[in-house]
Image: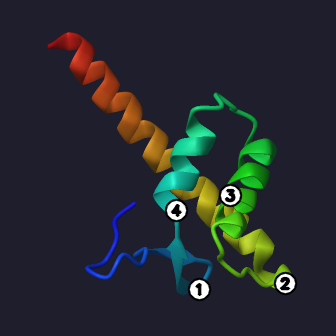
Amino acid sequence: MGTSCCGKPIATIIKVADFEAGIVGLENALHNVYVTGLDNDEELMNDLLKWVKDSGNYISPSREADYRKALLREYRAYAADVDHKTRAARQS
């Protein structure tokens, strides 16, 4: 996760349902869940939501389902990217 010039974390903007949301600590959450090796969508969504909330992001209870779906989508893209880079590194 990057930081600004003043040491404050930078939020990553993601699409959640019909709006965009800034998530602080998203990269860290994605990494921490990735290293667990989980592959069950329900467990992945639970862990992702927990990490994001623990990073200080407020998520309205009425929007949790939307965030869970968006976080899983972001996780799938992150995992695919890491897997691709790992395969490429092994081939070189």
Q: Are marks 4 and 2 in contact (CB under 8 Å)?
A: no
Q: Look at the image and tell me whether residue 75 can be seen.
A: no
**Dot 2 corresponds to which residue?**
62
Task: State the CA–CA distance, disc 1 to disc 4.
Answer: 19 Å
Task: State the CA–CA distance, disc 4 to disc 2.
Answer: 20 Å
Task: State the CA–CA distance, disc 3 to disc 1.
Answer: 22 Å
- Callout 1: SS: loop
Q: Look at the image and tell me whether residue 80 can be seen.
A: yes
Dot 3 amino acid type: Trp
**Dot 4 corresponds to which residue?**
26
Q: Is residue 57 left or right of residue 84?
A: right
Residue 86, percent from left and from top: 33, 24
**Dot 3 corresponds to which residue?**
51
- Taking depth in this image into account, of 6 and 60 the one nearest to the observer is 6
Q: Is residue 52 left or right of residue 81?
A: right
- Callout 3: SS: helix
Pick whichever of labels 4 and 2 is earlier in the sequence.
Answer: 4
Query: Which quarter of the picture shows residue 8?
Result: bottom left
- Taking depth in this image into account, of 59 and 3 the one nearest to the observer is 3
- Callout 4: SS: helix
**Dot 1 corresponds to which residue?**
18
Residue 25, percent from left and from top: 52, 64
Is residue 86 positioned above or below 76 on the image? above
Dot 4 amino acid type: Leu
